[in-house]
Image (cartoon, rainbow, N blue to C red):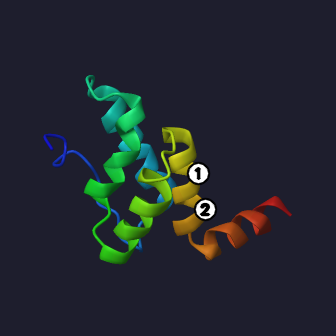
Amino acid sequence: MKLSSQLPEWYMSTDCRTFLKKIDLVLTTNVGIPKSEWPRVFLYTVKDQSAAEWVCEHIVNAGQNWEEAKETFTRHFQKAEYNSLLLRKFH
């Protein structure tokens, strides 16, 4: 994939929202990739084998669109500490 050098890599310690924003920027600025294929980008960016298998099963094989894929990815991989931090800020 020609964009591989431009894409961020996903590791369990990576901030999910920042990671997705970078992917959005790369895919948006590189014309020619149909948006229907954008969820497949996770197969190139997720380096952990079990995480890649999860992505393949729950996002790619499930036929999710890009918005659904981002939401599913965030729900699964976002750290619990991030949610509690947001709740503390909210209160």
- Horizontally, residue 68 falls left or right of residue 47, namely right
Residue at x-position 86% and y-position 64%: 91
Q: Please rate how many residues cluster around mark 2, counting C-alpha atoms within 10 Å: few if below 14, some from 14 to 19, many from 20.
A: few
Residue at x-position 41% and y-position 67%: 14
- The residue lying toward the viewer, choosing from 14 and 32, is 32
Q: Is residue 55 above or below residue 25?
A: below
Q: Is residue 89 above or below residue 69?
A: below
- Which x, y percent locates residue 40? 34, 47
- Which x, y percent locates residue 46? 32, 63
Q: Amino acid at mark 1?
A: Glu
- Which x, y percent locates residue 27? 33, 35
- The residue lying toward the viewer, choosing from 71 and 84, is 71
- The residue lying toward the viewer, choosing from 13 and 59, is 59
Q: Which residue is the extreme one toward the top?
A: 31
Residue at x-position 41% and y-position 45%: 39
- Horizontally, residue 54 falls left or right of residue 87, namely left
- Horizontally, residue 38 falls left or right of residue 79, namely left
Residue at x-position 50% and y-position 60%: 58
Residue contact at pointers 2 and 1, CB within 8 angstroms = yes
What residue is disc 1 on?
71
What residue is disc 2 on?
75
Q: Which residue is the extreme one toward the right?
A: 91
Picture quarter containing residue 54? bottom left
Q: Amino acid at mark 2?
A: Arg
Question: What is the secondary structure assignment of the residue under circle 2?
Answer: helix
